[in-house]
Image (cartoon, helix red, strand yellow):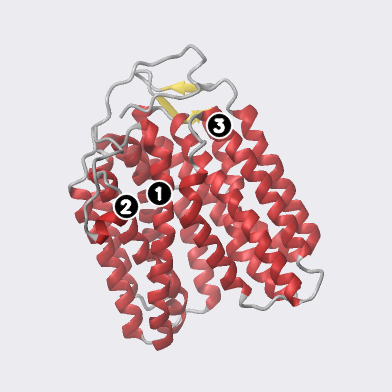
Amino acid sequence: MTSTTSPARPPHALGRLLPADPLLRRLVLMSLVNSVGDGLFVTVNVLFFTRSIGLTPGSVALGLTVAGVCGVFAGVPMGRLADRVGTKRLLLVVGPLQAVALLGYAFVHSFVAFVVLACVATVLERGAVAVRSALIARALPAEGQVRTRALLRSVMNAGLVAGSAGAALVLQADSYAGYVTVLVLDAVSFLAVAALLVGLPVPAPAPVASDDSDGGAGGADAAPGGRRTALRDRRYLVVTVLHAVLELQLAVLSVGLPLWIVLSTEAPAAMVAAVNVVNCLLVVLFQVRASRGVTDVPSAARACARGALLLAGGCLVYAAAQYGPAWAAAATILAGAFVHTLGELLTSAGGWTLSLDLADPRAHGEYQGVFMSGQAGAHVIGPLVITLTAVDHGAAGWVVLAGVFALAGPALLPAVRGAAVKAVRTA
């Protein structure tokens, strides 16, 4: 197994910016290429669907919602398939299929075709997320995985920012040719990631002795041969649901806060962009540092509990932004975004460890599929939840959201009680 430390870094400039370990460097490059492509497409996709394909905004929203629901159910079957055929082998197939699905948008001219293609693309995307998570679990030593995921998340945010900045030129041109160019570039990014994946060493799963001393690690029912199944692992399902509640914070940033700023505060609309910049920069700069104290299941649960309280505090700060002049509202929103992002950093780091350490190491694909499906479900229902609370009911709604976060995070502490301090994640 390649270690996570290596001798001296290459002397050239790019080498100094990349990790010294060859395996980790390849993972970073894959994350960077993929996220730049995603940043390009996500920034322009709605305008492309409406202005070039000719769909109405309502049709686009409905189609993407249906696709999101389909994506929720993609993780488990894709994860199980990865456990059977191998994570790397499956991703080498899924990546090119994602490229083909993306290019298919250039030939869509009806709502039905759009919905079908969006569902296919989303199923592939959500499945790939689960399989990539399982791949990292198999490719890296257990002790370095959380830090690696933190690094990859920092790189991902940097890539999204870079992709979004490049997409600004396409938005300015607002032409069919420009939008199709983005589709092509994003498709190329999927193929480039597949090419980088070819040389990535990923060991096959090794047999692990089963230990049924605590009832299958928290009440899990075992499959034939002693392997636990994620959908019957009660502890894992409870942790997945509780952490999915914390994932509602994404909808707070992407839906609730922009509408709150524009409709209910005196802050300038430009604060929407400022909040996104603050969030991305903090993730890029501090996600690795936030993960340092997360080393096992108990510390991961504590990190999630602290992060949830920070998310709750951010909601209360946002609520206060409706009282006061524009400068005070802007300062309050930035303060809330700072507190919110600190909570996001901790809940992300804790979630990675919980998803890995509570899983059966022989079924990382299935377990990661379940955990990622929980996150996908939160992303689908998140806009509705935030709209029914903060957007519709103002400060009182923000208080309700704060209460939800404040209850869900600490609830992880008793949920993981009795779990091994550090589960073996031998690949």
Residue 229 versus residue 28: which sits nearer the camera? 28
Distance, label 2 to label 3, CA atoms, is: 26 Å
Residue 57 appears in the rendering: yes
Callout 1 amino acid: Leu
Q: Residue at x 64, y 78 (%)?
A: 269
- The residue where tag 3 is placed is 299
Q: Secondary structure at mark 2?
A: helix
Q: Are marks 2 and 3 in contact (CB under 8 Å)?
A: no
Choose the circle earlier in sequence order: 1 or 2: 2
Specify few, some or many for label 2: CA neighbours under 10 Å numbering under 14, 14-19, or 20 or more.
Answer: many
Specify few, some or many for label 1: CA neighbours under 10 Å numbering under 14, 14-19, or 20 or more.
Answer: many
- The residue where tag 1 is placed is 151
Residue 41, above or below 121: below
Q: Are marks 1 and 2 in contact (CB under 8 Å)?
A: yes
Q: Residue at x 28, y 41 (%)?
A: 87
Q: Residue at x 56, y 44 (%)?
A: 347
Choose the circle earlier in sequence order: 2 or 3: 2
Distance, label 1 to label 3, CA atoms, is: 19 Å
Residue 109, above or below 142: below
Return the mark for residue 28. Answer: 2
Q: Secondary structure at mark 3?
A: helix
Give the percent coordinates (x, y) of residue 169: 39, 82
Callout 2 amino acid: Val
Choose the circle earlier in sequence order: 1 or 3: 1
Give the percent coordinates (x, y) of residue 285: 48, 55
